[in-house]
């Protein structure tokens, strides 16, 4: 693991520091771009990987952050029940514009835009989870309760 953080990871570390929690961004030697890569690189279960996915309201165009367990596929029809509108997956440019990060390293915090956030209840099956920190190589470990506190997300069933 590297000691000096790049620009995106340093931004997330600064964001984490605002919460007064002992959370530390680490740079891995191998990719954490996908949930499977991340679990293999970190040495944890795929379900412990926090995947931060951006969706877009089909009517309003509003960006929505869904923070899910790496094991789970997000049920877009169920999201319509929570939001009152259907959602779609936006293109990479939209994701970059609203978050400031490229797909494959989107963190659950530190976005350019204020995002409505939903958290997968299955993440609470684990004592600790791992989230991206702005790049495909940077991650941070936290508890599901810490994740809920820093994102202010609503805990739901996403699958």
Image (cartoon, helix red, strand yellow):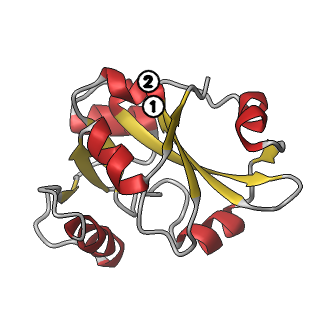
In the rendered image, the quadrant that contains the C terminus is: top right
Mark 2 or 1, closer to the camera: 2
Indicate left or right for 117 with 132 as reference.
right
Image point 45% across, 31% down: which residue?
A: 69
Query: Mark 2 and 1 residues: CB-CB less than 8 Å, in contact?
Result: yes
Judging by the rendered image, the residue that carries numbered circle 1 is 69
Judging by the rendered image, the residue that carries numbered circle 2 is 122
Image point 69% across, 69% down: which residue?
A: 93
Image point 28% across, 24% down: which residue?
A: 126
Q: Can residue 123 be seen in this view?
A: yes
Does 22 appear above or below 67? below
Image point 83% across, 44% down: which residue?
A: 85
Disc assigned to residue 80: none
**SS under mark 1:** strand
Instruction: Give 152 or 139, whichever is nearer the viewer.
Output: 152
Neighbor class of circle 2 (other Cα within 10 Å; few <14, some 14-19, many 20+) is many
Q: Check the image and name the residue furthest to the right.
A: 59
């Amino acid at each position: 693991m590297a000691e000096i953080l790049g620009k995106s990871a340093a931004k997330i570390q600064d964001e984490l520091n605002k919460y007064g929690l002992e959370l530390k961004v680490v740079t891995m030697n191998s990719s954490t771009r996908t949930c499977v890569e991340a679990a293999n690189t970190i040495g944890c279960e795929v379900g412990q990987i926090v995947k931060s996915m951006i969706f877009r309201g089909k009517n309003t165009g509003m960006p929505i952050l869904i923070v899910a367990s790496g094991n789970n596929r997000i049920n877009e029809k169920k999201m319509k029940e929570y939001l009152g509108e259907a959602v779609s997956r936006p293109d990479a440019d939209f994701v970059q514009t609203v978050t400031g990060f490229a797909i494959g390293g989107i963190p659950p915090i530190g976005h350019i835009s204020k995002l409505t956030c939903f958290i997968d209840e299955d993440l609470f099956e684990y004592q600790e989870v791992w989230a991206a920190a702005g790049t495909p190589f940077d991650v941070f470990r936290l508890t599901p309760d810490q994740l809920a506190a820093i994102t202010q997300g609503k805990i739901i069933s996403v699958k």
